[in-house]
């Protein structure tokens, strides 16, 4: 085959491939539905070029860039309209900056809060670089004062999960476990004296339903919740928030295919000020 034909074929294939990837991330597309039926995980965070593509849906003042792994930082800023001095709780906080949904809130907008992660290896970074945040080492669950077993990844500590099959699917060579004390969000909030929470972020690799089971959403009413929602646990998450008077913020689905975003129904009237079209 002539070299020119090969080059032409490659040139034509690139836009088709990019279009297919984008369609597979669209919740309304057939490809996306097929991925969910096959039990696939939410699409991985897109590279910088894809983020720039998705950022067009958000006000230019919020991007491009950001420390969060996807558009989470933009969405939080959009919802709160760059509110200052808020309070957050970051569950599954991991690194103090890389992939953090709360770095910008603290360092640029003066927020403070609690960061919780089952792996204590993240503590030094938070204590050194996030002075307005208190770091706690726990596995957030439906019961406190028990022990949870975390399956560890050799490739990336972010792949750690209480579900062994989940960790090994992302890292076939994963081995080793970590015993971690458990705590409920109710007990965290009570111990830390939290009564007014603006933003709750939960990203704990299939343990989200357990964390929600330990949260009294009728007593503690975070104004915005970002929660990672793999297909295996998505319905449990939707059911929980429906029972507790929260609504799904559908206008953020177009830019974030990994997480679901909720706000109390009573406050949803004010969400119309979002800068999303």
Image (cartoon, rainbow, N blue to C red):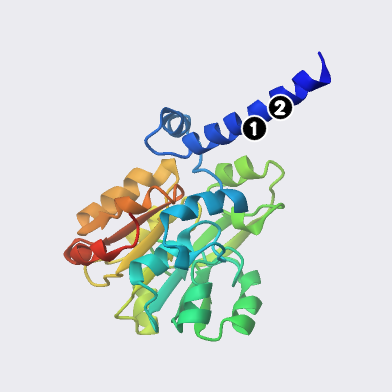
Residue 200 in view (yes/no) = no
Seen in the picture, residue 75 relative to 29 is either above or below; the reply is: below
Whole-percent x, y for residue 158 in the image:
60, 57
Seen as rendered, the residue at the extreme front is 4
Secondary element at tag 1: helix
**Where, by quadrant of the figure, is residue 276 drawn?**
bottom left
Residue 21 in view (yes/no) = yes
Seen in the picture, residue 182 relative to 233 is either above or below; the reply is: below
Whole-percent x, y for residue 171 in the image:
67, 45
As drawn, the label of residue 14 is 1
Q: Is disc 2 in contact with disc 1, using a CB cutoff of under 8 Å?
A: yes
For the C terminus, give its image quadrant: bottom left
**Where, by quadrant of the figure, is residue 150 drawn?**
bottom right
Residue bearing the label numbered 2 = 10
Seen in the picture, residue 5 relative to 225 is either above or below; the reply is: above
Whole-percent x, y for residue 266 in the image:
17, 65
Q: Is residue 12 left or right of residue 219?
A: right
């Amino acid at each position: 085959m002539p070299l020119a034909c090969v080059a032409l074929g490659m040139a034509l294939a690139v836009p088709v491939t990019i279009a297919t990837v984008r369609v597979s991330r669209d919740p309304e597309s057939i490809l996306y539905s097929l991925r969910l039926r096959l039990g696939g995980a939410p699409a991985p965070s897109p590279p910088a070029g894809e983020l720039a593509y998705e950022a067009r849906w958000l006000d230019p003042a919020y991007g491009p860039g950001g420390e969060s792994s996807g558009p989470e930082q933009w969405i939080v800023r959009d919802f709160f309209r760059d509110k200052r001095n808020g309070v957050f709780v970051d569950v599954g906080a991991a690194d103090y900056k890389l992939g953090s949904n709360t770095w910008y809130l603290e360092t640029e907008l003066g927020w403070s809060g609690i960061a919780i992660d089952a792996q204590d290896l993240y503590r030094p970074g938070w204590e050194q670089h996030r002075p307005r945040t208190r770091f706690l080492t726990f596995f957030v669950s439906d019961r406190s004062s028990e022990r949870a077993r975390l399956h560890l990844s050799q490739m990336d500590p972010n792949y750690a999960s209480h579900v062994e099959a989940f960790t090994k699917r992302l890292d076939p060579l994963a081995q080793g476990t970590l015993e971690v004390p458990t705590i409920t969000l109710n007990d965290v909030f009570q111990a830390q004296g939290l009564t007014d929470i603006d933003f709750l972020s939960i990203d704990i690799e299939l343990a989200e339903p357990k964390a929600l089971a330990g949260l009294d959403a009728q007593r503690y009413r975070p104004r915005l919740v970002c929660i990672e929602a793999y297909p295996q646990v998505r319905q449990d998450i939707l059911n929980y928030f429906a029972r507790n008077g929260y609504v799904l913020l559908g206008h953020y689905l177009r830019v974030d295919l990994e997480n679901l975003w909720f706000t109390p129904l009573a406050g949803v009237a004010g969400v119309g000020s979002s800068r999303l079209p």
